[in-house]
Amino acid sequence: MFDLRMVAIAASFILASIAVAAAERAPDQPAPAPRTESSDEARPIRVVLPAPWEAAAPGSTSQLRK
Protein backbone atom coordinates (compact mmCIF):
# COMPACT_ATOMS: atom_id res chain seq x y z
CA MET A 1 0.00 0.00 0.00
CA PHE A 2 2.88 2.34 0.82
CA ASP A 3 4.44 1.81 -2.62
CA LEU A 4 1.18 2.64 -4.39
CA ARG A 5 0.92 5.94 -2.48
CA MET A 6 4.51 6.83 -3.40
CA VAL A 7 3.82 6.11 -7.08
CA ALA A 8 0.67 8.23 -7.00
CA ILE A 9 2.48 11.14 -5.31
CA ALA A 10 5.42 10.93 -7.73
CA ALA A 11 3.06 10.85 -10.71
CA SER A 12 1.15 13.88 -9.43
CA PHE A 13 4.38 15.82 -8.96
CA ILE A 14 5.47 14.96 -12.49
CA LEU A 15 2.11 15.99 -13.94
CA ALA A 16 2.12 19.21 -11.93
CA SER A 17 5.61 20.12 -13.11
CA ILE A 18 4.59 19.48 -16.73
CA ALA A 19 1.52 21.69 -16.28
CA VAL A 20 3.62 24.49 -14.81
CA ALA A 21 6.16 24.22 -17.62
CA ALA A 22 3.44 24.26 -20.29
CA ALA A 23 1.56 27.21 -18.80
CA GLU A 24 1.74 30.54 -20.63
CA ARG A 25 3.98 33.23 -19.21
CA ALA A 26 2.30 36.23 -17.67
CA PRO A 27 2.78 39.43 -19.67
CA ASP A 28 5.56 41.68 -18.41
CA GLN A 29 3.62 44.89 -19.06
CA PRO A 30 0.30 45.58 -17.32
CA ALA A 31 -2.70 46.47 -19.45
CA PRO A 32 -3.00 50.19 -20.20
CA ALA A 33 -5.54 52.20 -18.24
CA PRO A 34 -8.80 52.94 -20.04
CA ARG A 35 -9.03 56.34 -21.70
CA THR A 36 -11.35 58.97 -20.25
CA GLU A 37 -13.64 60.97 -22.50
CA SER A 38 -12.82 64.42 -21.19
CA SER A 39 -9.79 66.03 -19.61
CA ASP A 40 -11.83 66.92 -16.49
CA GLU A 41 -12.20 63.24 -15.61
CA ALA A 42 -8.45 62.68 -15.84
CA ARG A 43 -7.55 65.23 -13.16
CA PRO A 44 -6.31 63.77 -9.89
CA ILE A 45 -8.25 64.41 -6.71
CA ARG A 46 -6.33 66.69 -4.39
CA VAL A 47 -7.04 66.88 -0.69
CA VAL A 48 -5.48 69.65 1.37
CA LEU A 49 -4.78 68.53 4.91
CA PRO A 50 -3.83 70.90 7.71
CA ALA A 51 -0.27 70.79 8.98
CA PRO A 52 0.13 68.90 12.28
CA TRP A 53 1.13 72.10 14.09
CA GLU A 54 -1.98 74.00 12.91
CA ALA A 55 -5.26 73.77 14.77
CA ALA A 56 -8.13 72.22 12.84
CA ALA A 57 -11.10 74.36 11.86
CA PRO A 58 -13.82 74.30 14.52
CA GLY A 59 -16.52 73.06 12.11
CA SER A 60 -14.53 70.07 10.87
CA THR A 61 -14.60 68.10 14.15
CA SER A 62 -18.35 68.55 14.77
CA GLN A 63 -19.22 66.29 11.84
CA LEU A 64 -17.08 63.44 13.14
CA ARG A 65 -18.52 63.48 16.69
CA LYS A 66 -22.16 62.96 15.71
Image (spheres, rainbow, N blue to C red):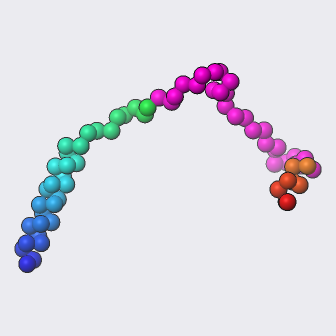
Left or right of residue 39, residue 2 in this image: left
Q: How many labels sit on residues?
A: 0
Question: Does 43 appear above or below 14?
Answer: above
Instruction: Give how far across and how far down residue 5 sits, in percent.
Output: 12, 72
Q: Left of 20 or right of it: where is 47?
A: right
Judge whether residue 2 is colored magenta. Answer: no
| Magenta part, dominant SS | loop
Confirm whether the magenta stretch covers residue 37. Answer: yes
Q: Position of residue 17 (x, y in %)?
A: 18, 52
Q: Residue at x 43, y 32 (%)?
A: 31
Magenta stretch bounds:
32-58
Residue at the outermost front position: 37
Give coordinates of residue 27: x percent, y percent: 35, 34
From the viewer's side, name the closer residue of 24 and 28: 24
Q: Outermost residue, right direction?
A: 58
- Can you say whether 12 is above or below 19 in the image? below
Q: Residue at x 54, y 25 (%)?
A: 35
Q: Is residue 60 above or below residue 32?
A: below
In x, y percent, where is residue 22?
A: 19, 43
Left or right: 20, with 45 as reference point: left
The residue at 11%/60% (across/down) is 11
> In the rendered image, which quarter contains the N terminus?
bottom left
Q: Residue at 15% x, 66% y: name it.
A: 9
Q: Which of the 4 image quadrants contains residue 66?
A: bottom right
